[in-house]
Amino acid sequence: MAATLAYDDVEVGTELPAQTFPVTRATLVRYAGASGDFNPIHWNEKFAREVGLPDVIAHGMFTMASAARVVTDWAGDPGAVVEYGVRFTKPVVVPNDDQGAVVEVSAKVAAKLDDRQVRVDLTAMCAGQKVLGMARAVVRLA
């Protein structure tokens, strides 16, 4: 866990350490079991294609949670995140191979707010496409 960040030590434009998150079909099975979301678009290629998707896709909440890890790892405390929201812009397509997909997440401090809080803007990419839009977190610092 990272050291506690001090509000006075964080500047607008500060870049958080970027992270990559591999996603395989096995990842999706584990997430489905943990979340209870067994929608066939997350495991059945035939069904996913029948409903107009290119292939099986990752759970949106899995993608959202993965991106949030960049912020919680940086803050050193998941409880420091007081607000978090995204828009799902593109699905994370997960091929049935050994590589799967990779979600690449970067983030930076976009604004300093009242009450020792900062707004962090995130960018989540997969296969060259932005998969989360308007991804923002508000973090309370020490």
Image: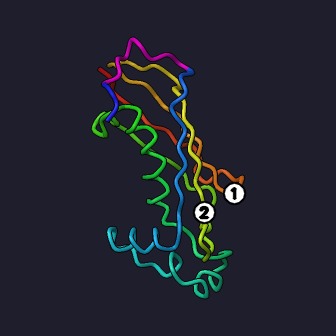
Is residue 83 rendered magenta in the image?
A: no
* Tag 2–tag 1 contact (CB < 8 Å): yes
Q: CA distance from mark 2 to mark 1?
A: 8 Å
Q: In this figure, which residue is indicated by the disc labeled 2?
A: 101
Q: Which residue is located at x 48 percent, y 47 percent? A: 67
Q: Which residue is located at x 39 percent, y 38 percent? A: 73
Question: Residue 45 location, x and y as percent?
Answer: 60, 83
Question: Residue 110 location, x and y as percent?
Answer: 54, 26
Disc 1, SS: loop
Using residue 39 as the reference point, say whether residue 90 is left or right of it. right
The residue at the far front in this view is: 98
Q: Which residue is located at x 50 percent, y 57 percent? A: 63
Disc 2, SS: strand
Q: Which mark is residue 127?
A: 1
Q: Main secondary structure of the magenta part?
A: loop
In the rendered structure, which amino acid carries the disc numbered 1? Ala
Q: Is residue 100 above or below residue 126?
A: below
Range of the magenta residues? 4-12
In the rendered structure, which amino acid carries the disc numbered 2? Ala
- Kindly indicate the quadrant of the structure image that contains residue 141: top left
Q: In the depicted view, which residue is nearer to us: 89 or 98? A: 98
Q: Which residue is located at x 44 percent, y 45 percent? A: 68
Which of the two labelled residues, at mark 2 and mark 1, occupies the earlier sequence position?
2
Question: Residue 11 location, x and y as percent?
Answer: 49, 16
Quadrant where the N terminus is found in the figure: top left
Quadrant where the C terminus is found in the figure: top left
Is residue 10 rendered magenta in the image?
A: yes
